[in-house]
Image (tube, grey):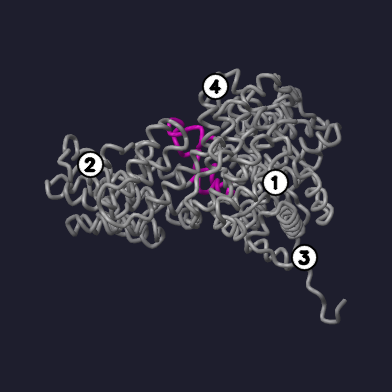
Amino acid sequence: MSGFLERLAAHSAAALVFAALGASSAFAGDDDPLIVGRQLFVLAYAAAETGAPLPSLEDPAELRGYPLYPYLERARLIRALGKIKGPGPLPVDDDARAFLAAHAGEPVAPDLRRAWLRSLAARAEWSTFAEQYSAAVADARLRCQWLQARIELGHTNNLEADVAEQWLTPQRLPPDCEQAFDWLRARNGLGDALVEQRVRLLLANGQTDFARTVARGLAPPRAAAYARWADMLDKPTASLDAALADAERATELDGAPLAAGWRKLARSNSSNALERYDRMLAVLGRDSPAAARYTLVLALGLAWDRRGTEALELFDAVPANMFDDYAREWQTRAALWAGDWGQVRRSIAAMSGDARGSARWRYWNARAAAALDDEAAANEIYEALLPTDNFYAANAAARLGRPAVPHPARLEQHPAEIEALGARPAFVRARELKLCGLRGPAFREWQAAFDALTEAERTQAVALAASWQWHDVSVAMATQQRVFFDYELLYPRPYDAEVAAAAGLASLDAPLLYGMIRQESLFRSDAVSAAGAVGLAQLLPATAVRTARAWQHPEPGTVDLFDPAMNIKLGAWHMRDLTDRFDRQTVVALAAYNAGESAAERWLPQDNMDADVWIENIPYNETREYVQRVLWHGIVFAWLESGAPQRVDGWIAEVAPLRPIRQASSDGG
């Protein structure tokens, strides 16, 4: 929250009214009937969130009648609950109970219920806690507090099973869970079998350190075996060498540690795994079913590392009944990298009907047919792909020597129905929450309202969100409703001026830059990823600072990155830097933008390779799809801007290794 809002929140109720009535709205036009209530709400909500003191005056009528007034009441109740220090039932408990009864089933209620439950647990008010507990709002801490409440109240029916279920969680749990686990131990209900189950779940989830800790509750030989399993995941090369030199070590815990270490090594360092492959087969028995499973794991690792010929040799040694579609897809990619078009055809033919019928594998079937001199079959498939409107359809057009042409199909909109939906209380609340900057609650209100609609109403609600310029919601809901071809709706252009300016400064193609923004953030200027990437172009703050320095621009702070113009400009400059870094190869630069420069460089071929083959073999699913989708988005944005079919001849060009940097001679020549 800004210091400005914090200062305003400390004003008196009379001052808040004056500010609301006297200021022009930042949210809507002067004819907006909710403008005063909205401004009052923003200021009062800021005061409730920060705990700023206000005189004990009644809220003005404009605020009490505002659709979001329950959210203000909730914020005040949560604040009051957070201030409670001592034990005992309090008047705020009655207020919380009354609020939840009045708003049962509404999106405004769960946050208060969670806050109240936390307060009740802190005060050991277990009877009220048990009465108000709802699994629908509970996190791990609240679930454990619910178990504690039942222990304290003597409600032990089925309690052992419920505590055991909580115990079997694949990550570390909060300290609040220990009392329930101690209760189960005291009844001999937390035996070695449950401990081993928990350890295995933790190991499967990569929680190796905590798995070692939990395993210490077992007998020393068993604990040591699980510690070695954890070592297999942390240090697979050394641990596998130790196991391969010791038959007893290789087979302990039914061979599960050995299999886990082999999977980890094949994925992280296929060369090291390949060096140990013959020794592994000697331990397993070359003709055993286990040997075939280990062979498939290594084949996949080699395919991910783009070692196509070696991967194909191992895939050939795996019985057909051990393949699923995932393995067949990577066998196909290995064949593409190796240029074995016959194997491409055979691998696709062995996929399930659903996989084989996807645009992806139909396209590669056509490419294989063309490579094997069956041009008629290839062209027939290319023609059939054109209306699917995606990366593969555009590639098919390029293979046919034609421009790519999207096939729009507008969603039929009914203005009267859209207006009626927008007037429903739940949608009014969703819009007001969005306008007030409360995006999380806004989406929860929207989703609850959307879920209650008929299918016909839902398609009109998509148009309603678009009319509010709530682009991330309208696009997501359109996709959910299988609205794939209304390009005006799916490809809004809310930042035309900023994109044009940034593209000009960086000498980038503006439609491609728009495509990146769409894929990165779905036009959310306030987007923040789990990794800390910020804004429309999803820049890490460190990357933004480095880019600004390189372009001799003042360094941005994190707050600056939420400004659309600044964020788009820095994103364009960063993409330009990557394009130059990778010899103007746009597809490689896009991969680097998503996965990092070192990953993109690692993926480059040793010799020139068709761009579509290179993209298909990007080992990160997210990055592969990112490159493909951004390229297609760029086509759509360019088509929307110009109305003209888009030539994508560059899509069937080649990706090349980086050119060596020429060293200047000693005389400067």
Identify which amino acid the numbered label 3 is placed on: Trp
Would you call the spot at circle 4 few (<14 residues within 10 Å), some (14-19), or many (20 or more)? some
In the figure, residue 524 lies in which quadrant?
Answer: top right
Identify which amino acid the numbered label 1 is placed on: Ala
**Image vertical order of residue 617 relative to residue 240, above or below:** above
The one nearer the camera, 101 or 311, is: 101
| Gap in angstroms between the C-alphas marked 3 and 1 | 34 Å
Magenta segment includes 174: no
Q: Are marks 2 and 4 in contact (CB under 8 Å)?
A: no
Residue 618 percent across, percent down from the top left: 61, 46
Nearest to the eye among marks 3 and 1: give it: 1
Mark closer to the chain start, 3 or 1: 1
What are the residue bounds of the magenta stretch?
299-328
| Gap in angstroms between the C-alphas marked 3 and 4 | 50 Å
Residue 204 percent across, percent down from the top left: 36, 48
The one nearer the camera, 302 or 14, is: 14
The residue carrying mark 1 is: 26
Residue 357 percent across, percent down from the top left: 60, 25
Residue at left 69%, top 64%?
556
